[in-house]
Image (spheres, grey):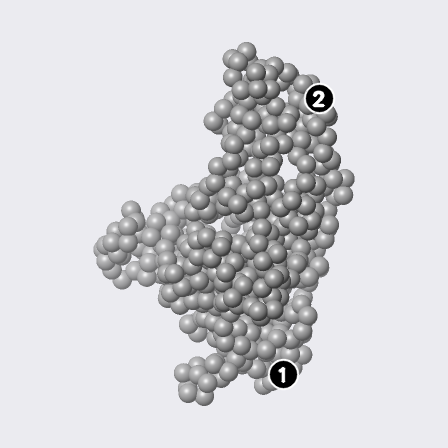
Amino acid sequence: MGTDIITGLTGNPAAGGLTENHPERPASLASPQAYKEAPMLAALVQQGRLPPVEERLPTTPCVIPVLHQTGKYDSVMNRAFKGLSDRWGPTKMINHQFVWYDKDLNLIPHLCESWNVNADASEWTFYLRAGTHWSDGVAFTADDIVWWYHNVLTDPRIFSVPPSQWMAGDQVMTIEQKGQYTIKMKFNQPNVLFMYKLARGSGAGFCLCPSHYMKRYHIDFTDDPAALEAEAAAAGFASWGEYYRGDRSEWYLNPDLPDLGPWLAKNTLYQPLFVMERNPYFYGVDADDNQLPYVDTITHNLFSADDDLTTWIKNGVIDFQARHTNFAYYDEYKEGEATGGYQVVLGVSAGHVAIQLNMTTLSSARLREFFQDLRVRRALSLAVNRTYLNTQFYAGLATPRQYSPLSTSPQYNATLSGTDIAYDVAEANALLDDAGYTAKDGEGFRLWKDGSGERISFTIEGTAEPGSADGQAALQVIHDYATVGIEATYQKTDLSLIHI
């Protein structure tokens, strides 16, 4: 069931853009002389500390469509986060890369001005925006991607195995530079979904590398290899390659790292107040030729307990937040709107509250067989009372469904989304019996069918806090499983053990 309180539109992308007839960037609606910029940047230009905006933007800037109306420049947006393990919160605000999605979930050009692909999707050619700059003012060109390919992606001292997004089968792609702003990526077999992997990405594993800066942290290019090794060791890394990959190339750990995104880190995510400030060289404008972003600074305040975030929201401390909002506090959010000076907006999210059975678990051959049986999986689905979960924990605002593409997605399938979601204990019991799990112990729990006499039992791991809507829902699912003789327990797992 989708449960996020959000503003905006998320979901699975459309398949458009994966043809030779690739989409083109909308033409700018004004001449370069008409480009406008944030007051804080205009002041730096006037002081001679920054070039004029038309010199900082690409020759053809990316025109980013607004959802409702043209925005106004403002100073600060206050948000909340849970520390280093919560890096995806800040990261999702900045790492829209080669392409992104329009409101209909079609891929559209972003950092690349256009692209094309051959007939079997094994060769992808990208045309970068001429005149794009890194945040320190150095030009971004295809040279940066080529250097990354030869010296980072395929260097076993940094990656023992290249990240899977750059591979087809067991072979890494090859790369060809066709001029200063054109790059071709070639795979040994069709890679139809490759473009979707370029919508987001950062760090050493992504191709947008400020080579002029990162060379100092590569043993083959640094002026002092011994000093680099010593620096890596002092930072707690076993080698310079681990230091390169795990620290120096990460935007939220290295505030000095040049970037292309709309905001830049001003300190590290280790700090209780993480600050992001606008990038004066960001390549995007709105349809009225205002250089984006609209907001100068974004702050992320550290919290650990959901109650703390709820208090901040009700007191008007938080300006814009969907991440970590909790349906268990929905009524409190609504009650605080008037005094807190904010608005609760309900939107659509691709997120689901779902049970994902580990069908390849190595911990137990019996459990692996159990989960791999379609009859068992159907039974566990039918045993869950989704209507009760929705009304009891999600204020009736979620949608009972299977974990699948949303109705807004071109990949939506109504039949599959609605399969086995009706609450049917009798059918669930019949399916488990048919699968051979008929024996029960004195408490009515089913036993493994190997004659051991041991009770079927497994653990549900999740990041939901006890008392949260998701945490309470997990306990209710466990109760529902027990009604058909299956024992399960819930274990709260720290976010840092998942987001590694």
**Residue 497: % across, % down:** 43, 43
Measured in 3D between alpha carbons, the distance from the residue under mark 2 to the one under mark 1, in whole angstroms, is 70 Å
Q: From the viewer's perspective, is the residue at label 2 or at label 1 nearer?
A: 2
Answer with left or right where residue 5 lies relative to residue 240.
Answer: right
Answer with left or right where residue 427 lies relative to residue 100.
Answer: right
Rendered residue at 64%/16% (across/down)? 438
Q: Quadrant of the N terminus?
A: top right
Q: Nearer the viewer, residue 115 or 242?
A: 242
Considering the numbered disc 2 on the image, is that residue within a helix, a strand or a loop? Answer: helix
Answer with left or right where residue 488 lies relative to residue 499.
Answer: right
Considering the numbered disc 1 on the image, is that residue within a helix, a strand or a loop? Answer: loop
Q: Quadrant of residue 249?
A: bottom left
Classed neighbour count for the residue bearing mark 1: other residues with Cα under 10 Å, few (<14), some (14–19), many (≥20): few
| Image: 477 above or below 455 | below
Rendered residue at 69%/18% (across/down)? 434
Q: Nearer the viewer, residue 256 or 144?
A: 256
Rendered residue at 48%/27% (across/down)? 362
Mark 1: which amino acid? Ser
Q: Nearer the viewer, residue 68 or 391?
A: 391
Q: Is residue 183 visible?
A: no
| Image: 385 above or below 328 | above
Query: What mark, if any, has residue 430 been given in the picture?
Result: 2
**Residue 217: % across, % down:** 33, 58
Q: Is residue 296 visible?
A: yes
**Residue 227: % across, % down:** 23, 58
Mark 2: which amino acid? Ala
Answer with left or right where residue 90 lies relative to residue 424.
Answer: left
- Farthest-out residue, top: 451
Query: What residue sits right under mark 1 in the picture?
Result: 31
